[in-house]
Image: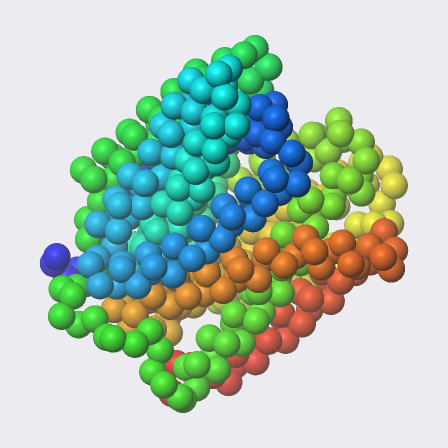
Amino acid sequence: MVARSEPIRKNVLVMMAGNTITTSANSLWIMFMPFFFKDIGLDIIVIGFIFTFVALSRALTTLIGGRAADRFGRKPIILVGRIIYATGPMVILWSLHFVDQSPHLAGLIAVLGYIWMFAGSGVSRPASSMLLVESSPEKQRGLSFMIATRVLPSIPPAILILVGTSFYLGGLFWLALVFGVLGLSSVVILLAAGLKETLAAPESVQTEILPRGGRGSWFLLLILMAFALDGMSGSGLSWYVPIFVGDMELYGLMIAMSTLVIAIASLGAGALVDRFGTRTAIVSGWTLLAMTVAIFPFAHQSLEILFLYSIWAGLDMVDISVPPLIIAERYPKERRASVLGLFSTTTSLAGIVGPSMVSFALLLGSGVPFFLKAVMNLTGVALFYLATRRLTPRD
């Protein structure tokens, strides 16, 4: 590997293209996996456990991938993760051969392929984020990150999900998987040919993710707590919102609109972070998000629900680029991916608790989960402000 001191802007374009192809390919099939599991006879409770194991596999491999990215470089770990990710739909496609003969065997193979796929996602995630940040001009890191990960990748699914729906309803799920395999495989080739390494030679790698003692540990702890609260409450509400709304047609319209809102809001979120900094972005974004979520259960008209949910989806984009940016600002390059891996693993594991937390909150009333998220986001604001105002790992 060769050390690079200047931003490698080509990396941003390559990652943007790769992410857009990935979301396009996945839009044709990945949204329908719960229906597939159900149609081959898996119990609804079993399906719930499947998605829990998927979340766990991605969370745990993110920690491994982050550590490896600081040891071996960003590009090789991105490619390893992407290769694993691309083989997932291959395994699921293979499982279709057993659906008629042995649905349970088909289900087992498909589940293993699905979990394997998201393990690959976890491996490549910290390396991908850090390569993007390190390849962008310092004053445009937030905007570059959001364009490459959210803005353009969010646009094709608005149409391709409908194509995937027609495939699934028409008995052509296998064809959707074929397109998925081709798309994800082409991304591996694109990244292998187009990416440039951003990490210096591995001799500079330190053995510890964080120095023992000191303020750096407190900084990361407070940041972790802040984002864990947001992730926990967000993951909990993700399953409850469609039930609370009750109207499937309205909910489908909400999701369709939110896809376009995310694409537009991501631009604003990236620019906000670059212009005013991570602290201002989080404090203002999460405060407005808390207010929006607290008002949401009082909306009854369809237009009110659509309006508030669109604002909610847009404000949710404010914090997307913050973790890799704030870690890049405060940690040396040879420890960044490891810290981001630890961060992502911790917040992902916390998110698994969210659905159960919301279930208990429902015992107190149908609107309580929304109020709980508002309180948790405001608590996160206080924790983030304290961490970024008082503590830095370099102190």
Q: Identify which residue is drawn at 63% across, 70% down.
A: 381
Residue 171 relative to residue 183: left or right: right
Residue 48 relative to residue 119: left or right: right
Colour treatment of the image: rainbow
Note whether residue 330 is visible. Answer: yes
Residue 83 relative to residue 271: left or right: left
Closest to the observer: 355 or 248?
355
User: On the rendered image, what quadrant is the N terminus found in?
Assistant: bottom left
- What percent of the width, then of the height, locates residue 308? 75, 46
Q: Identify which residue is drawn at 69% across, 30% down.
A: 252
- What percent of the width, then of the height, locates residue 129? 37, 54
Please, which residue is most extreme toward the top here? Answer: 170
Closest to the observer: 168 or 284?
168
Residue 41 relative to residue 10: left or right: right
Note whether residue 275 is visible. Answer: no
Q: Identify which residue is drawn at 57% across, 29% down.
A: 37
- Is 52 located above or below residue 376 in the figure? above
Closest to the observer: 290 or 335?
335
- What percent of the width, then of the height, locates residue 265? 57, 46
Q: Identify which residue is drawn at 35% across, 51% down.
A: 123
User: On the rendered image, what quadrant is the C terminus found in?
Assistant: bottom left
Q: How many marks?
A: 0
- Is 315 located above or below residue 93 in the figure? below
- What percent of the width, then of the height, locates residue 231? 59, 58
Closest to the observer: 47 or 75?
47
